[in-house]
Image: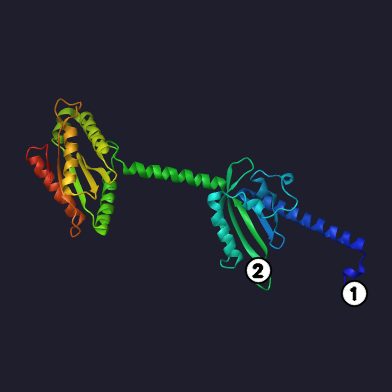
Amino acid sequence: MTDYQKYTKEELVLKITSLEQLNKRLLQTFQEAERLEFGWTGNLGQWFWDFTTNEVTFNPLKAEAIGYMQEDLPEKVPYQFFTDKVHPDDKEEVMRLMSEHLRGEIPVWEVKYRIQAKDGTWKVYQDRGKVTERNEKGEPLFLTGIVFDITQEEQERKQLQTKNELLTNQRKKDTLTSLYSRSAITVELVKYTNRARKQNQPLSLVFLSIDHYSDYEKNFGIVGTEEVLTVTGQIIQSAMQKQTVAGRYRESAFLILLENTKKEDAYRWAETIRQAVLETLFDLPKQVSISGGISVYDSEETISELVQKAALKLTAAQKNGGNQIIV
């Protein structure tokens, strides 16, 4: 006679009911302990998934965090209650990792995802689970895991990322001209020369400088000469094409890179800038002009040699009276 055969049907029902109540009370006690011990960390408690019945037992915090109280939940909660609320852009990755773990291909299932709350807003959960029991065929029977609400952490991380990107962009920009700073245009120069060499495409470098800038600064002061820099930068910016980057290389000199551009086209582009500056009325009692030198990248030369070629032509243009572009 087995242990259960000595009980009447009524006694068995009573015993089962008693065990269910005990399990419920133990679970409630465990969940309350989780709230006290881990509530401050964003921990929403553990969950248990009976894979054979697709029933999930979990700390109510997991549902409450997305706005669902006990009365909002079905009597038996399937795992789809949560996965159906995962953000469409995250769901494929979530289900892929879950499936891989269920098949035993990865040791644990750990994933971060957005989940929609009852009011339509989005929370961010960090979920980690593991199959704790499999049958003789290796098929999952039972899983257990833990979930964290990391919404605030993600918001703070994104805010910090935005601030860092803003600071990075500010460091890249020259404050007077809104073009790249010297350090930033130097980085772009390395990128552009590497790309030109790999793709075997022409790259033209244009060195422009405002003629007699030091005299303007001496005779008319910093405010007037800074206005010349600002407006010249705006003229260069307005003429830039998709494959063009420009930066303020030194005090009154600008370095421009024209990707996939031959020297003849680079010369026409530089001439457009020169003419535009010449025709601009600045707040100075004198006409402003610029000069320039152009070099074309040779994959056999160094970056310094490329810049030096254009710089020498710029110097020659200014020694010849300025207001000209030398190729």
Image coordinates of residue 131 in percent, x first then y, are 64, 65
Give me the residue at 27% from left, 38% from top: 237
- Residue bearing mark 2: 139
Q: Is residue 320 left or right of residue 136?
A: left
Give me the residue at 74% from left, 53% from top: 76
**Residue reaching furthest to the left:** 320
Residue type at mark 1 is Met
| Marks 2/1: CA–CA distance | 33 Å
- The disc, 2 or 1, on the residue closer to the chain's N-terminal end is 1
Image coordinates of residue 9 in percent, x first then y, are 91, 63
Image coordinates of residue 199 in percent, x first then y, are 26, 57
Depth order, front residue of 224/70: 70
* Image disc number at residue 1: 1
Give me the residue at 21% from left, 49% from top: 261
Instruction: Look at the image and tell me whether residue 5 can be seen.
Output: yes
User: Toward which corner of the image does residue 298 lie, by quadrant?
Assistant: bottom left
